Amino acid sequence: MRRLIRLLLCATLLAVAPVLRAQQPVQRTFSDDRSGFVVLTDVVPDALLEIRYHSTFNFVGERIDGYEEPVALLTREAAQALKKASDILMEQGYRLKIFDAYRPQRAVDHFKRWARDKDDRRMQPYFYPRVDKALLFSLGYVSSHSGHSRGSTLDLTIVDMETGLEADMGGHFDLLDTRSHVDSPEVTPEQHARRMILRNAMGAAGFRPYEKEWWHFTLRGEPYPTTYFTFPVRAESN
């Protein structure tokens, strides 16, 4: 009987161990050390920039805290991997356009303050027309701690080198909606195929996608998986 009880106890512990591990809080650290970062266009000179959070054309409707210059920063490892993706896409007639890369924690805090202001819906018609603002966090469109703040995540699209126009992806950057899901049935086969051009090139270069946002990618094996950086977005450190 005692042997049976021990076996049952061991089986129970094995069954709940994954749950217990999943419930462990994430140990995050914060740092203002930018020594592991580079200016993205220094490594990928063919990339185009449209840094939306340095402008007022974003889902908040104002320049976001921490975006002091319209530049893109990435960890050195992520930038080098992105160069591979750029080379792949240029062979297919496309250039990369970057909307966001490293995002300081203070910018994420700005998003959090905005999300608590239920009356501020000035950008809803364009960026979240079908989503209740109060649900943006629970639906995974906005996060309290963003992978962007770890420096190896970026938002981007592709531009046709012949026409100079962004590829039609069936939905614009930061459209917080199910239409932005990578495999959304709401887009045409041609639009989905263009999403796959971007996704395949980024995957070949070592990035993993985010299924809810066709434009969002994170470097596999990122160098700072639990560190969230706080320095502002600008080309120089001083």
Image: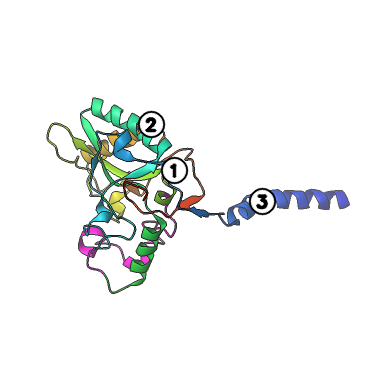
Residue 175 image offset from top left, x and y in percent:
26, 54
Residue designated by label 3: 17
Checking the image for residue 205, the label placed there is 2
Labels 1 and 3: the sequence-earlier one? 3
Instruction: Name the residue located 42 percent from the left edge and 54 percent from the top edge.
Output: 146
Nearer the camera: disc 2 or disc 1: 1
> The residue under label 1 is which amino acid type?
Ser
Dot 3 falls on a residue whose secondary structure is helix
Answer with left or right where residue 18 lies relative to residue 76.
Answer: right
Q: Which residues are magenta?
A: 121-147
> The residue under label 3 is which amino acid type?
Ala
Nearer to us in this view, 35 or 192? 35
Nearer the camera: disc 2 or disc 3: 2
Residue designated by label 1: 35
Answer with left or right where residue 45 lies relative to residue 7.
Answer: left
Dot 1 falls on a residue whose secondary structure is loop
Q: Main secondary structure of the magenta part?
A: loop
